[in-house]
Image (tube, coloured by chain):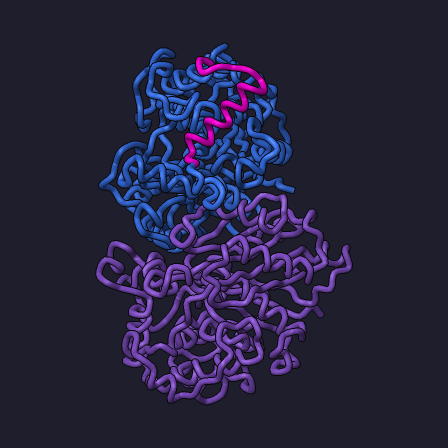
Chain colours: A purple, B blue
Amino acid sequence: MFMSDIRVAGTGLTAFGNAPERTGRDLFAEASIAAFEDSGVPREDVDAVFYGNFMGELAEHQGHQGPLMAEAAGVDAPATRYEAACASSGVAVRDAVVRIRSGAADVVLVGGVERMTNLGTAGATEALAIAADELWEVRAGMTFPGAYALMAQAYFTEYGGEHEDLAHIAVKNHENALPNDNAQYQNAIEVSDVLEAPQVSSPLGLYDSCPISDGAAAVVLTSAAYAEAHGLEAPVAITGSGQGGDRFALHDRDYLARSPAAREAGEEAYADAGVDAGDVDVAEVHDCFTIAEVLAIEALGLEPVGKGITAARDGRTTAEGETPINLSGGLKAKGHPVGATGASQIAEITTLLAGTHPNSESVDDATIGVTHNAGGTVASAVVHVLEVVA
Amino acid sequence: MFMSDIRVAGTGLTAFGNAPERTGRDLFAEASIAAFEDSGVPREDVDAVFYGNFMGELAEHQGHQGPLMAEAAGVDAPATRYEAACASSGVAVRDAVVRIRSGAADVVLVGGVERMTNLGTAGATEALAIAADELWEVRAGMTFPGAYALMAQAYFTEYGGEHEDLAHIAVKNHENALPNDNAQYQNAIEVSDVLEAPQVSSPLGLYDSCPISDGAAAVVLTSAAYAEAHGLEAPVAITGSGQGGDRFALHDRDYLARSPAAREAGEEAYADAGVDAGDVDVAEVHDCFTIAEVLAIEALGLEPVGKGITAARDGRTTAEGETPINLSGGLKAKGHPVGATGASQIAEITTLLAGTHPNSESVDDATIGVTHNAGGTVASAVVHVLEVVA
C-alpha cells in the first residue's frame, strides 16, 4: 500500500562537532537554508515541518520546538516535534513519508537538531540516559556505554568474537570520514589505537564509542508528482519505510545480542520497497558503539546472525567491500547529534546515490541504499530504503 | 483528500487530579486498559502506538516514552512519542488519522500522559515554561499565566470586556464538571468566587487558571473498514483534522488577542469534514485560562471576533446554550494533565455524541462535535471534527 515514491529534493547538514555556543535554532536555520538551496523548492510550498529532537528540555530548557524550528527555517506551516531518543528524526522522516503518500501534503521539511556539548560529557551522558528505563535501569546505575557493553559481552558469549573485531569497525568508519568535511573526526586511526584506548565499559573503549556532538540535518521531501511538475533535480526516492519496537528495558528482552526491532523495521521497509537485503548496495547504520554496527547489519540481513562481527575486519563492509557501511564515517566519526542523526543518514545516502558525496566513487554503480536509525538500546528502530529513480 | 472515516472504537480516561505517587506508565496502563475494554479490539490488532507527552524529561527523567508506553499498554507494536507542549496528544491523534487514512494502519492506539503534581506548583509552572521561548520570553521572566494575562489585556483593549465576563466561563466549566467523576474539581463556584480569588497575573486570578494535574487518556482508532469487518460498536467517526502554527514568541505575533493557528486548524478540519462552523453542536476547547476559551471559540468561528467574551455570561455556551462548550468541565475543572488533554477531548466528544457521557442529555440531538487543543500561547493548534455515523 506504500506505493508512491517520495523524492528527496534537497539535503542540508551543519558540521557535526563541538559548537557549545550555538543554539538549536541557529543550527537548524543553517541546515534548512542549505536544504532549501539544494532543493530549489520555495519555502512557501512547504505543507508541514516534521522535526526530531531528543534532549532539548535538558540541554536548552526548550520544549515545543516544532513551531520554533519552523520559524528558524523561515517556514509558515504547522510543525510537529518527534521524539524517539536517538531515532527522533528517523521517525519524523517516516511520518513525513506517510503524510506525503496519504496525499495530505506535497512538500515536507524534515530534520532534526541536537545540542549536547554545552552539557559537558558527564551531563550529556546523564541526559542520554533518559532514553533508558529510569525506574529499572538508570536508577540501578545503567548508562548507554554500559548497556551496549552488556550487548557486546552477550554477543561474544553467544556467537564469538573479540574486541579486535570491533576495533576494525572504528578504524573503517574513521577512514570513511576522512573526506567528509562535516565529520567531527577527520583523522585516521589504527586497530592498536582502539585496543589501547581507555576502557569505558568492558569490552568497549573510548574508540568504540561515538562522540558527544552538536549539529543539525534537514531534508526537503516532496511527492513524485510535485518534483515532476516543478522540474526538480531529485534523482533519489524514498521507496520503503519501516519501524519496529521492542521491550523498553534490556532485562525484559528476548535477546541481548540481537535487535528484533531493527529486523522488523528492515523487513517492513524492504517489503514496502519491493527489494531484498541482497539488493542493498550501501547503508548508513546506527553505530553509536562499534557493537551496534554489528547488530544493525545482522538485523538488516546484510550479514547472517553471528557473522557481522567479522564484516569490517574481513573487508566486506569497507569502502572497497561488497556493501560499504557508514561511508559518511557513521556516528563514530561523523558524530552523533542524536536528534539530527536519522535525517542526516537520509542526506548521506541521497548524496551517495546521486554521485555528489565525497565518497560516491566507492559506490559508483549503487542504486539502492538503506538507512537504519535506532533509539535507546534499540527499543525503537526506523529503516528507510532509498533508490535512484530509473 | 481526507475522505475515509476514522472510527473511535473505544476511549479510556484516568481520573484527572493529584496522584503524585503514580508513575506515567501506571497512569497510561489504566487508561489503555479502559480503552481496549471499551473498544472490543484485541491488543494484537494494534498496528502502531501514537503517544503524546510534554514534560516527562523534567517530571520523571524519562524520555523515549513511546515504546515504554506501548509496553505499559500491553501492545507489541512500533510506538512514537509526539510533543507539541499542551497539544502533544492532539498532534498524535492527527498523525494517527493520517496513518489510518493512508492505508498503512488499521488500528492505532493513541493517547497521552502527564505527570505534574510531583513537581509541585512552582516546579510545574517552571516546567510548563519550556513551551515558551527560553531565550526571549522565559529568561525575561515570562510564565504562562503572565502570557495569557497579556492576551487578556490585549483583548479587553481591542474588543472590550472585563474580568466578570471571564468569571462566567470558570463558573460554567465548574458547573459542567459536577457529574464528571473523572474531573479534578466537582464543586460549583460563583462569579464572586472568581472575582475575589487571589490574583495570579492581572486580570487573571486563581479561578481563571486550570490546575496542575496528573492523568492519562487513551483512544483506540480504527479504519471504518476494520470497524465494520469486526462488528464494532463505534458510532462516532473522526471526519476532519487540521493543524495550524504561529510564530513562537508572543512579541513576534501579528495578534495578541487572536489565535490564527487555531483558525487555520479549524478551517482545515471543517473543510476536511465538509462542515461549517454553524454545523457544530458541541465542542471541547483548550481553556487553560478563561481567556483561552474566548480566543478558541472565536478562532473556531463559533463566535464572531470580539464577541466570544460574552458567550458564557449570556448563556450561549452553557449546557443549556446553543453550542455547549466544555461539557466535560474543560481544562479548568476537569483538569489539565497536558500531554493527555488532546486525547481526552476526543474521548469526551465521542461519549457526548454517543450518548454515554454524564452530560449527554444536554446535547441530545447533537451529531457534530469539535475538539480544539493548543500548545504554548497557541503556536501550535490541532482541531478535529467528530460526527455520529449515519
Position of residue A386 relative to residue B374, above or below, is below
Position of residue A69 relative to residue A212, above or below, is above
Point out the image quarter for the N terminus of chain A: bottom right
- Magenta run includes residue B161: yes
How many labels, in total? 0
Residue at image location 44% in from the left, 48% down from the top? A62
Point out the image quarter for the C terminus of chain A: bottom right
- Magenta run includes residue B275: no
Q: Which residues are magenta?
A: B142-165
Residue B202 coordinates in the image, percent (x, y): 42, 22
Give left or right: position of B269 versus B148. Answer: right
Residue A167: name its quadrant. bottom left
Residue at image location 54% in from the left, 58% down from the top? A27
- In front: A14, or A288? A14
Residue A377: name its quadrant. bottom left
Give left or right: position of B346 versus B22. Answer: right
Residue A134 coordinates in the image, percent (x, y): 28, 55
Magenta residues, dominant SS class: helix
Residue B171 coordinates in the image, percent (x, y): 39, 16
Residue at image location 59% in from the left, 30% down from the top? B255
Give left or right: position of B47 versus B99. Answer: left
Position of residue B251 relative to residue B352, above or below, is below
Give left or right: position of A219 versus A214. Answer: right
- In front: A195, or B385? A195
Q: Is residue A213 visible?
A: yes
Position of residue B64 relative to residue B187, above or below, is below
Residue at image location 43% in from the left, 75% down from the top? A293
Residue B383 coordinates in the image, percent (x, y): 54, 34
Q: Is residue B89 visible?
A: no
